[in-house]
Amino acid sequence: MYIFAVILGKVRFTNLKTVKTDIKIRDVFFRDGKVFFSLEDGREIGAPLECYPKLCRTSKEELLDFSISPGGYGVHWNRVDKYLSAYGMLSHDQEKNTQLL
């Protein structure tokens, strides 16, 4: 199965079989205007909050009201209705503020 997205006028295709599902989130933390995921394999990944407008505009209390999905693949911020997966963070083009597929 293939999915596509139009990014800046270009159509990009990706095979869904290439999506990594072994990346699991253990914890979430914030520092210096960035959101970080601690992964089960010991890595930490992060991105500036400004890449995620809903998260950037929310209060500290709302940022701390999150839940990690049962499988560990993503995080849901309950009060702002925002979901972000570890794979989504890794595939986010922070310079263009777009999601790469």
Image: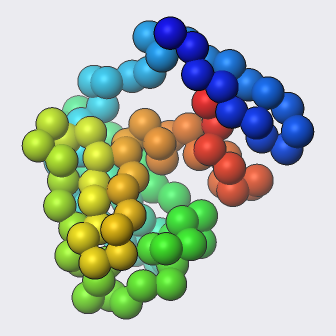
Q: How many marks?
A: 0
The residue drawn where x is 27% and y is 24% is 22
Specify the quadrant of the image occupied by residue 66: bottom left
Counting from the top left corner in percent of width and height, residue 55 is at 45, 74
| Image coordinates for residue 93, horizontal then vertical, percent | 67, 46
Q: Nearer the viewer, residue 35 or 83?
A: 83
| Left or right for 79, reference 40 | right
The residue at the point 33 percent across, 87 percent down is: 60
Q: Is the residue 42 above or below the residue 78 in the image?
A: above
The quarter holding residue 29 reads bottom left
The residue positioned farthest toward the right in the image shown: 9
Q: Is residue 44 left or right of residue 13?
A: left
Q: Is residue 69 visible?
A: yes
Residue 31 image offset from top left, x and y in percent: 40, 74
Point out the image quarter for the C terminus: top right
Q: Is 95 drawn above or below residue 4 in the view shown?
A: below
**Colour scheme in the image?**
rainbow
Observer able to see residue 44: no
The residue lying at 48 percent from left, 16 percent from top is 16
- The relative height of residue 20 versus residue 39 in the rendered view (above or below) is above
Q: Position of residue 47 (x, y in %)?
A: 51, 59
In the image, is residue 69 above or below residue 73? below
- Residue at the image point whose x is 79% and y is 27% from the top: 11
**Viewer-proximal residue among 75 and 81:** 81
